[in-house]
Image: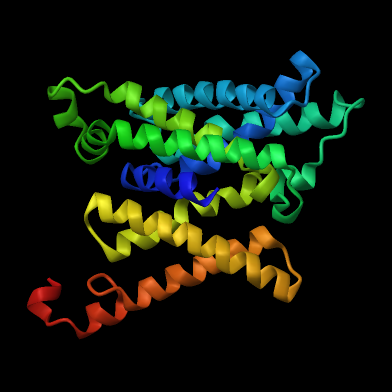
Amino acid sequence: VAIPTSLLGVFLYLRRRSLIADAHAHLAVPGVVIAFLLTGSLSLPVLLIGALIVGLGASWLIEYLAARRTIRADAAIGIAFTPLFALGIILMSTLITDAHIDTHCLLFGDVLGIPNRAIVTLALVALTVVGLVAGFWRWIAVATLDPDFARTLGIPTRLIHYGLMSAVAATTMASFEAVGSILVIAMIIVPAATAHLLTDRLLPMTALATGHGVLSAWLGMYASVWLNVSTAGAMVVAGGSLYTLALLFAPRHGLIARRTMPPEVNA
């Protein structure tokens, strides 16, 4: 979970679209419910396709609303995903009576109880995300840092945008049984925010974010066993603690460094 979420989180963070992660994490709920109602199957690939379709539809709606001059981008995200999330909860509570969908697992996950098939799915998603980012690195980097320049070069920025949204939707859906739809948000946003405090270069930023995500998962796993608390929650707390350390001690952007920096350099 940590590898694809951290990697995708960097591009969302630099595009000022971090809240998209929140939207997709919640949109997977109606995606799962609608896929089950249409097919009657709780197979993970079927549910993954449902989450992808709903996520892409919501991404298009968010971009359409954000393009309106009277609607702010952050408001567009809230307008798009909250009604769909509520619809998913309503459908789950009223129409699904012949199947058990563990809402606690859906929202919070269970790292220590996920089956082997979920681990295999996560591995395939992680490899796919890493492979696609590596294969289209130049396109994604230019489209993220300077979309206007990317368009002049003929780079399909809209295709890249929806490709990233598809990857985020697939990753959040595949992560449900491990960390749930709520805590996966932190695993996307916090590593990217931490890495941005430590470097201004894209490639080191992705490496630092991925390292942060993996270290948070490792520390959280052992802390949860030792303290007998939620594993996913412990992972997020570990990530937040690492962010706090970076916020204080980052060599250029940390609070301590900025206080001790000469005024002309700080300016």
* Residue depicted at x 21% and y 36%: 142
Q: Is residue 90 left or right of residue 193?
A: right
The quarter of the image holding the C terminus is: bottom left
- Count of numbered labels shown in the rendering: 0
Q: Residue furthest bottom?
A: 260
* Residue depicted at x 31% and y 64%: 197
Q: Is residue 234 left or right of residue 243?
A: right
Q: Residue furthest right?
A: 98
Q: Is residue 105 left or right of residue 27?
A: right
Near-viewer residue (189 or 40): 40
Answer whether residue 201 is visible to the viewer in this image: yes
Asked if 210 appears above or below 244 in the picture, the reply is above
Percent position (x, y) of residue 55?
54, 27
Near-viewer residue (105 or 30): 105
Q: Residue furthest top?
A: 38
* Residue depicted at x 86% and y 27%: 94
Percent position (x, y) of residue 236?
57, 61
Asked if 69 appears above or below 17 in the picture, the reply is above
Q: Quadrant of residue 49?
A: top right
Asked if 207 appears above or below 70 in the picture, the reply is below
Percent position (x, y) of residue 138?
22, 35
Q: Quadrant of residue 119?
A: top right
* Residue depicted at x 70% and y 37%: 117
